[in-house]
Image (spheres, rainbow, N blue to C red):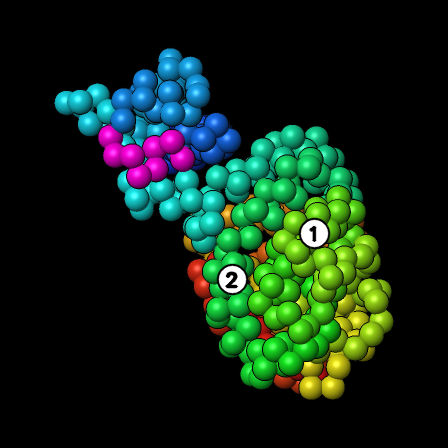
Amino acid sequence: MDTSTIDMARVEAFTMRAIGDATAGYTGVLVSLGHKLGLYKAMAGAGPLSAREVARRAGCAERYVREWLNAQAAGGYLAYHATSDTYELSPEHALVLADEDSPVFIPPAWEVPAAMWFDEPKALEAFRTGRGVAWGEHDARMACGIAAFYRNGYRASLVAQWLPALDGVVAQLEAGIAVADIGCGHGHATLLMAEAFPRSRFHGFDTHAASLEAARQAAAAAGLADRTFFAQARADDYLDQRYGLICFFDTLHDLGDPVAAARHAARTLAPGGTVLLVEPFAHDRVEDNLTPVGQLYYSGSSLICCAHAIAEGGQLVLGAQAGPQRLEQVFRKAGFSHFRPAAQTPFNLVFEIRR
């Protein structure tokens, strides 16, 4: 390499960027510890606290807690008051770090990269051989982390915003229809709808047995087992009945044959029924997705979404940044004539689809 052509200022700037990314990985471990040890909850709404007070409230050893607090303060997660040697969790940051019902609650998201690191040997083999890695082959923290990460976002948007954005669907749900949730995972979205619309019946389908068992347990705990049904099935062979609403919540791009899944939806959709498609936010062109959100989704797609789609046969591996145009093509090929953007958030695109 001809070092005389190297711009050392750019090298230094990029080195600091890379160190920042590595620091984020360290911080993620501490965020997860802070959540599981109750450190954030001990500080939420309490104002400035000493390290000893935080440790006492959380039932932890002070010396570890002080180092954790300093790391959190260095990263801007906590405020440090030098005069009083105290630390404070602001109300805004508490929504992200301490409130488990907040739509921006983030600690469980760190379970996903933890699973990615644990599964690195599988990823290395997949990249070298082209084989797939099915959802159930990942470390258990993967399914739990993704379910918890998406749960609160769905809770904030699904019933209040996304379903009302679909023409006539809320009225149908209130009257009573059969609903299918394809790739339901832990069933969080299924249960949100079941709670809101007691006259409808909700069927969750997934290929991952452990997630389905978690969904059944959650339904029983919520008193919703009488109007929810969870079964192991692929997206192109689930229970063949007529559904007034078929939902794909951040699932379609994970499938090995999304066109076959869309065709099965067309076969099982009741007259006047609707497909609700929720997918990761993306533009159609790569250059328009080179953002922090795009980086998050392309990274996850490399190790999770594409890997599972390949494991399912990989007829069409969309990836998590498919974009509206490619998604529409899937449903047009399956015989649908109506494909309408209904809503969006910084993280999701929502579509209304009809035959």
Q: What is the x, y in percent for residue 20?
A: 39, 33
> Residue at 47% of width from left, 60% of height from top?
156
> Residue at 66% of width from left, 44% of height from top?
143
Residue type at the position of mark 1: Ala
Disc ID at residue 62: none
Q: Is residue 52 magenta?
A: no
Please report the bounds of the magenta region as a residue range.
41-48
Measured along the vertical axis of the image, is residue 24 above or below residue 315? above
Q: Does residue 274 appear in this view?
A: no
Q: What is the x, y in percent for residue 57?
A: 38, 25
Q: How many marks?
A: 2
Task: Decide which of 199, 119 is in the foreground and name it.
Answer: 199
> Residue at 34% of width from left, 37% of height from top?
44
Measured along the vertical axis of the image, is residue 248 above or below residue 244? above
Q: Does residue 166 appear in this view?
A: yes
Task: Decide which of 281, 239 is in the foreground and name it.
Answer: 239
**Which residue is the site of mark 2?**
348
The C terminus is located in which quarter?
Answer: bottom right
**Displayed quadrant of residue 7:** top left
- Per the image, label 1 sits on a secondary structure element best described as helix
Q: What is the x, y in percent for residue 78?
A: 30, 33
Residue type at the position of mark 2: Asn
Asked if the residue at tag 1 contacts the one at tag 2, i.e. Cβ–Cβ closer than 8 Å, the answer is no
Give neighbour class at mark 1: few <14, some 14-19, many 20+ (Cα, 10 Å): few
CA gap, disc 2 to disc 1?
29 Å
Disc ID at residue 220: 1
